Amino acid sequence: MSLKIIKAGIQDTVQDMGRYGYQSLGINPGGAMDRFSAQVANLLAGNKSDKAVIELYFPASVFLFKQPALIAISGADFSPSINGEKIPSNHPILVNKNSILQFHKTVKGARAYLAIYGGVEVPQWLNSSSTNLKAGIGGFSGRALQKEDEIKFNVSDRIADKIKEKEFYVLPWQADDNWGDTTGEVYVLPGTEWERLTSSSKENFVMTSYVITNQSDRMGYRLNNIPLNCMTNEEVISSAVSFGTIQLLPDGRLIIMMADHQTAGGYPRIAHVISAHHKKLAQMKAGDKIHFRITDHQNAEDLMIKQQQHLQQLQNACTFRLQEFFNR
Amino acid sequence: MNHPVLPYRIFPLGDSAITVDFGNCISEVINDEVIARFYQIQNNPLPGIIEVVPAYSSITVYYDVLRIKKKTPAEETAYDCVKQQLENLLRLSTEQRNNEKRLMKIPVCYDSEFATDIKQMAAVKKLSPDEIINIHTSKAYRVYMLGFLPGFTYMGEVDERITMPRKPQPVIITAGSVGIAGRQTGIYPLASPGGWQIIGRTPLRLTSLNPSEGGTSDDPENLTLLKAGDTVQFYSISRDEFENY
């Protein structure tokens, strides 16, 4: 019935697609940083795409399966293993009870997603399973996973029937989690205060690569850009900011709002990272270089739709292959 | 009863949200309009709208691009579609809400142990802590918006004599702390890092978020004690009253 944490990671949390409808009360949406990979993991594990998953950072938790499960891991490659044997990301995997899942090193990316068939079971708070670390509510007890925690999930007899005596079994189909371009280029739409930037600052913004500093977390990424200048110091009265909003701080440096961003901000909104590139952004980490490129709404929406179509095709394929597998 | 529509700017907030700004300023008239528009859109939800977020002088509407694009021609963006619909809605006047503006009385203990920044502030402002307390409690404040933390209220405006800039670096602030930043005053509903100058603490609980603590259904009405548009009057209580509250 459960997945036990036998060693805690640095900040592994239960997340889903976010908690919407309460920002007017200051309650931010949160949710998975890389929603695309979270959805890929769910689909591979035979779930609807929006089920709750576990978001993992490296060093990640070590998990003990107390029951057989069907799982998938997507997003960052943290070199996962079961009982010491390396397993691939982006495949459905049957895991027998008493198996240990652990992660050995960062090969690429920043956040991995562990999906379990049936979804991890946590009480919903305001229609979402996402962990709000700041308020200490939602997800698993409102906090990151700790040693000895036991996360419940739905067990299916079909899984036990299929796995029999094996420790684990990797199903042969896989997803392309690298979908889309994987360069450091991140597309943005200009923000309301873009026009406040001096022309040399505008040029710098699009011509230069910026390094993500280690002051970066689920709330936001700070960049070490050379300070940008505005032509006016007119105050920006606090107003909504969104996942992907790039604000200009008083010292001229930039901060990109991420999943746990505040609901409102009072700094110039220079640009916004397009939704289709949130995945790319969420897999970047301190030290990585980011190169902004300006695009338009048409392109931003087209890319979002293509991404969704990719997920839809994956869902169709996964549903078909899993059914075939279980009926065999 | 109708009232004229205020002028506004409408602009995208990325590719999935749109902001209507009535003036980038702190004004009761504009904030009244914001709150009226917030309820107008909430009560007449357009298809594909995810949520509406009111601020001081703006509302932001989050929308579902994929849902909207299913029903719009290929050459029209979801943004254009939502913008058009919002502009139509903004042409309609809002119902004059029988603004029974709630007056909320909030007890605050200004004891020096809680008021971690009051001494420093008194020195800067050339006032005594008692004078700061008197000035802070001498007028009622409007709740302009909630944001930053669940249930955090942005209120204003404080008397010129007690305005203070934010601290350069945030510090850990205790739940219930009452602070000042510029001409704003506010209450931290939860313990959090923050940069406001802390002058007291309320024993009231400002949120009931946690279901296990007897809080909430999913009814947003019950999640926070204060809402945008409320009027708040602080009053001073003693340490004893605080402890026994």
Image: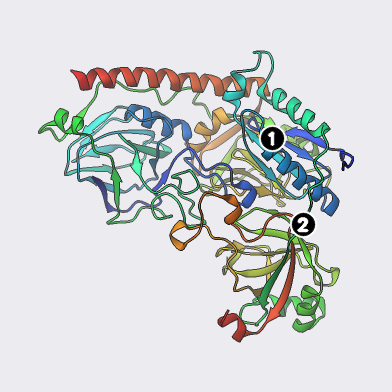
Callout 2: helix, strand or loop? loop
Local crowd size for mark 2, using a 10 Å CA cut-off: few (<14), some (14–19), many (≥20) = few
Q: Which residue is mark 1?
A: B44
Q: Is residue A21 left or right of residue B90?
A: left
**First-in-chain label (1 vs 2):** 1
Q: Which residue is mark 2?
A: B100
Q: Amino acid at mark 1?
A: Asn
Residue B105 appears at what percent x and percent y? Answer: 71, 70
Q: Amino acid at mark 2?
A: Glu
Identify the disc placed on residue A322. none
Kindly indicate the quadrant of the structure image that contains residue A75: top left
Residue A79 appears at what percent x and percent y? Answer: 30, 37
Q: Is residue B107 above or below residue A90?
A: below
Q: Residue at x 47, y 40 (%)?
A: A32
Q: Chain of mark 2?
A: B
Residue A269 appears at what percent x and percent y? Answer: 71, 41
Quadrant placement of the C terminus of chain A: top left
Local crowd size for mark 1, using a 10 Å CA cut-off: few (<14), some (14–19), many (≥20) = few
Most extreme residue toward the top is: B74
Viewer-proximal residue among A43 and B207? B207
Residue A95 appears at what percent x and percent y? Answer: 21, 35
Most extreme residue toward the left is: A165
Q: Is residue A50 left or right of residue A97?
A: right
Q: Residue at x 57, y 30 (%)?
A: A275
Q: Are marks 1 and 2 on the same chain?
A: yes
Q: Residue at x 47, y 43 (%)?
A: A128
Residue A266 in view, yes or no: yes
Quadrant placement of the N terminus of chain A: top left
Kindly indicate the quadrant of the structure image that contains residue A51: top left
